[in-house]
Image: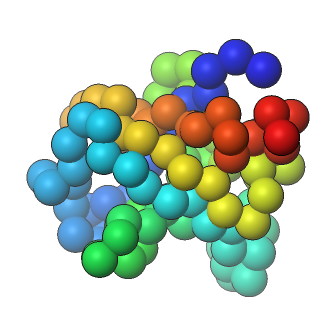
Amino acid sequence: MGKVYITLTGTRHYFGDDFLERGMKLVLEKEPDNEFDKEAIKVLCEGIGKIGYVANSPYTVLGESMSAGRLYDKIGECATVKVVFKTEKGVICKVSKKSLIDYI
């Protein structure tokens, strides 16, 4: 599997995205008990907690990013990502190859 990217969305509901910088490490954690989306993957920042979610809608997934639904079975219970860049519509992050089940 080649490079895998996700769109971090929903940050405005938490702490915003002003503090996010290129290269910053974040953690993805599955949230199977989410009442709105059974394939929800929350995004956590050390010292802060939940800062958003992996986009899972055609309206929020940017470019060639993978949706939460497509990524869900490709990671274990959690994964790590690095911020690549920010746009007005979301934050693009690269998934660590070591986090992908096919890589292990």
Q: Above or below — where is 84 with respect to 18? A: above
Colour mode of the rendering? rainbow
Classify 10 as above or below 2: below
Which quarter of the image is occupied by the C terminus? top right
Q: Residue at x 13, y 52 (%)?
A: 18
Q: In the image, 79: left or right of 93?
A: right
Visible in this render: residue 58?
A: no
* Left/right of residue 50 with respect to residue 34 in the rendered view: left
Count of numbered labels shown in the rendering: 0
Q: Residue 101 sits in which quadrant?
A: top right
Residue at 38% in and 77% down? 49
Please give the name of the residue rendered at 68% of the width and 46% of the height, measured from the top-left corner: 99
Q: Quadrant of residue 66?
A: top right
The residue lying toward the viewer, choosing from 61 and 20, is 20
Is residue 5 at least partly visible in the picture? yes
10 w.r.t. 65: above or below: below
Location of residue 100 in the rendering, given as x and y in whole percent from the top left corner: 75, 41
Across and down, in percent, residue 29 comes to 62, 66
The location of residue 33, given as percent across then percent down, is: 74, 82
Percent position (x, y) of residue 3? 62, 21
Residue at x 75% of width, y 66% of height: 77
